[in-house]
Image (tube, rainbow, N blue to C red):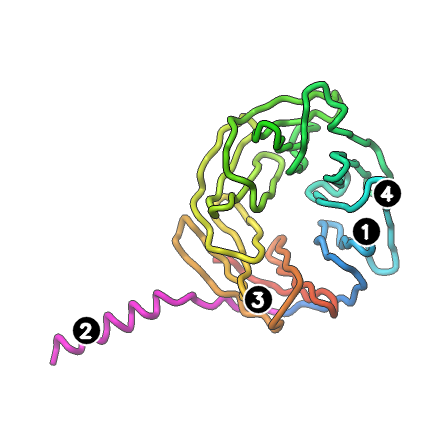
Amino acid sequence: MRNLILFFFFTTISIAFGQNQKLLSSKINHVIIDADQFLGYDQFGYYYTIKNNVFSKIKDKESLEYKNITLGKITKIDLLNPLKIVLFYENFNTAILLDNQLNETQKINFSENPIPIVVNAIGIASQNQLWVYNSLNQQIGLYDYLKNDYKVISTSFPESIKYYQSNFNAFYWIDDKNNWFSCDIFGKITKKGKTPDFDSIEIINDNQFIFSKNSILTIEDIEKNQKFEIEILEKTFKKFGYKDQILSIFTSGGITNYKITIP
């Protein structure tokens, strides 16, 4: 009988730890917006959207816009530095730099560079530089946009980039096999681990990421080997974003912001 009780006890514990723990969220507010894409917030309280290929910056009744019909569809926007916003137009291999009033300060046509560059990934880096993934040689480089100087910093890697994200000091990417890597500004590549299959994902730091699969949000910590399913009211959503313990959920009805505390 004692052995039977112990068996059921350990079986119950195993099942409990095999399931994702729940992470509670607290709703802060809901913002009604008319947009095709919600891109995120900055530290000054502005939120950024795209509607009909027009990039907008909005706060209360203040609204600024930028559009460039000659370059086609906006492929990527980097909001890491709201004073130096990067817009990328992949079909024209061109990046546009904007100031905080969405005035164009610089146009970079990578096709005109002395070293051939076909950009598939881009993001702002430190020291007046841009992260650039050149698909011609499958290498990461740094482009100094003040000196118009480009240098390769990494070795080539064969797998295609499924998702990428960057900050001032690191370029992160996930390949087609869900392997997660990082590259620092000196070109050192580190394999971080492997992510689950995902519909969308956002990297929080060197160890944590939030991903959605079938409209279920989960945060995972690879260092602590922990997973938490995030409870929200929405059953489906277009996109999510995370910044400074605020989880933003974008649906056709607008943006709902939640406060979450990540363990």
Q: Which residue is mark 4?
A: 68
Q: Does the magenta portion include 145?
A: no
Q: Is residue 251 above or below residue 190?
A: below
User: Could you tell me residue 122's position as x and y percent?
Assistant: 66, 37
Horizontal relation, residue 179 to residue 34: left or right:
left
Q: Earlier in the sequence, mark 3 or mark 2?
A: 2
Q: Earlier in the sequence, mark 1 or mark 3?
A: 1
Magenta region: which residues? 1-26
User: What number is the disc on residue 130?
Assistant: none
Would you identify the image quadrant in which residue 100 lies?
top right
Q: Which residue is mark 2?
A: 7
Residue drawn 61% across and 40% down?
166
Q: Which residue is mark 1?
A: 53
Given residues 240 and 126, the one toward you in this image is 240
Kindly state the secondary structure of the residue where label 2 is placed.
helix
Kindly state the secondary structure of the residue where label 1 is placed.
loop
Q: Earlier in the sequence, mark 4 or mark 2?
A: 2
Would you identify the image quadrant in which residue 144 lies?
top right
Residue drawn 74% across and 57% down?
37
Magenta stretch, main secondary structure class: helix
Given residues 11 and 119, the one toward you in this image is 119
Name the mark nearer the viewer: 4 or 2.
4
Q: Which residue is mark 3?
A: 215
Specify the amino acid type for callout 2.
Phe
Kindly state the secondary structure of the residue where label 3 is placed.
loop
Q: Is residue 16 above or below residue 114?
A: below
Q: Does the magenta portion include 25?
A: yes
How many residues crowd around disc 2 within 10 Å: few (fewer than 14), some, or many (20 or more)? few
Q: Earlier in the sequence, mark 4 or mark 1?
A: 1
